Image (tube, helix red, strand yellow):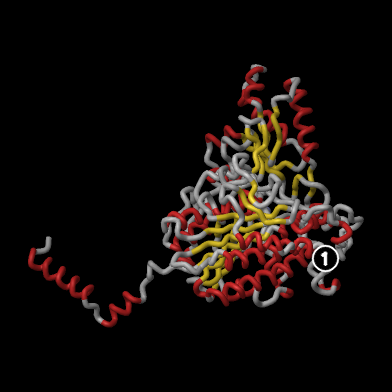
Amino acid sequence: MLQKRTRIFFLNILFLMYSSPTPALAQKISGSTNYSDKPKLVVGIVVDQMRYDYLFRYREKFGKDGFMKLLNEGFFCANTHYNYIPTFTGPGHACIYTGATPSINGIVANDWYERKENDTMYCVQDKSVQTVGSTTQAGMMSPKNLLTTTITDELRLSDNFQSKVIGISLKDRGAILPTGHTANAAYWFDGTNGNWISSSYYMQDLPAWVKEFNSLKLPDHYLSAPWKTLLPMEQYTESTADDNAYEEPYPKELKPVFPHDFPKIRENDFELVRKSPAGNTMTKELAIAAMKGENLGKGSHADFLAISFSATDYVGHQFGTNAIETEDTYLRLDKDIAELLSYIESTYGKNNVLVFLTADHGALQNPQFLADHKIPAKALKAKDVEAYLKSNLNTVYGTSDFVSCILNDQVYLDQNSIASKQLNPDEVENTVAEILNGFDGVSNTVTATQLSFFEFAEGGRNLIQHGYNSKRCGDVMIMAEPGVIEYKPTGTTHGSGYSYDTHVPLLWYGWKIPQGSTSDKITVTDIAATLASLLHIEFPNGCTGHPIRDLVK
Ligand SMILES: [Zn+2]
């Protein structure tokens, strides 16, 4: 125990140290973190369906100012994965911005089955709101199905709603989910009339700058000429030769080959813009128009612009991961990103803007392409899985009409129907699982009961558990074998817990970001946690991620 006089002596010393610091101490204090420091703007970039390996596959052909600028001058997290199943667009965007898995944020798929309604629910569907900017129903969307806050909500909450948050994507879910419940605006593309639209959730009328952008009629311009390759065809050595059986031709095309004659094959709408690199270029143009039109980054609080480039996903589904079309789309996106970065740096300065880039999921190569190269893979037909299940259930129970639907590799059972037949619900659930385990291409199943009573620490069941929400998910979850997808034979898809779907690029750049890289295992839930730590704001309320140590130390 210190004597009273001694304690006073030490308190005086402490007071002197902090009231008049020595030069060395003063330097130490001024060199510490300035907690009021904020970037002028945060720019989140999601590249829909971008596999991790595209960064390196196309590296030689990328310019120095796009992806390579982020890679060479920013911070690269080389081992970033999703930690849930299913890896779809809605869940991916929700996970990046909530730092939570679908089990918590509720975005368990793009569409799920609502038992009470006996109908499917689209992840951003909201029949209580109206389209703004068009007479179609494409704007009847909002974030009401999202159960948690996003990092963008937390930014708005942190400064009494003085930060501006804007979301932009061809896809409604790519614009709405990242910007959360309190966004100033989200804008997406209406392929029926070629306009960018919003919903009455955000506003009653489009701002002048969006109306002006729509009046440019860029989609008309984009569809007025064929899509030709950026480089001479023979330089696309990273991809399969143009004419092959793994790709899906556009409607009205006989072969999936260049040049894609848009003026000839286009329908009476603008949907083809989504499925071509021009969709990304238009997204970039609108993002720049938003920065100008909304004076983003010009106030005293940090603003947030969430951009999602969706055309990469439409092209990927159409042509697969090995197509010249896919490569060409990334080479053109690289130029769009270079232009975006150049605008940002010249307007705000590199050190005033925090940029991150990631993807909402990856994708498998076309299964037939893999099989032709001796790698086990195949595409299952959903109706074959359903027929197999029902036929076996008919053998066991004499009926299968208690199966409500099979969606997202999940079997939804009608518990009322099971009760009315006086069947044991646990036994039915287990029987469905056992039957499906016998289907060729199925690796494993897990039941809702198992997910409710056991914590799976690792493996596929752990990933399914992170994607499982009891109100929105099925009763038996199916996990396919590696390389097996439920899809048509051409093109490709995603959704699994295997690395081709879970492994995504993650690049950081600008404000407070050191140059470097890490190969530490990062989960996508860590992105929102890292943003919260860097910005000194609260984590999103369902966040399970951790700040990336190299970026916040
Ligand atoms: Zn996606």
Q: In the rendered view, would you say 507 is above or below 197? A: below
Tell me which residue sits at (75%, 47%) in the image: 485
Q: For this view, does 21 lie left or right of residue 274?
A: left
Question: Does 404 appear above or below 50?
Answer: above
Q: Which residue lies furthest to the bottom in this view?
A: 23
Can I make out residue 537 in this image? Answer: yes
| x then y, percent, for residue 24 | 29, 81
Which one is in front, 429 or 94? 94
- Above or below residue 182? Residue 355 is below
Query: From the viewer's perspective, is 280 left or right of 384?
Result: left
Residue placed at 65% from the left, 57% from the top?
A: 169
Q: What residue type is labelled 1?
A: Trp
Q: Residue beneath label 1, please?
A: 227
Residue 235 point in image, percent of width and height: 82, 74
Quadrant for the N terminus, please.
bottom left
- The single residue placed furthest to the right in the displayed view is 254
Which quadrant of the figure contains the C terminus? Answer: bottom left
Image-quadrant location for residue 426: top right
Residue 83 visible:
no
Q: Is mark 1 on a helix, strand or loop?
A: loop
Q: At which x and y percent is residue 446?
A: 63, 37
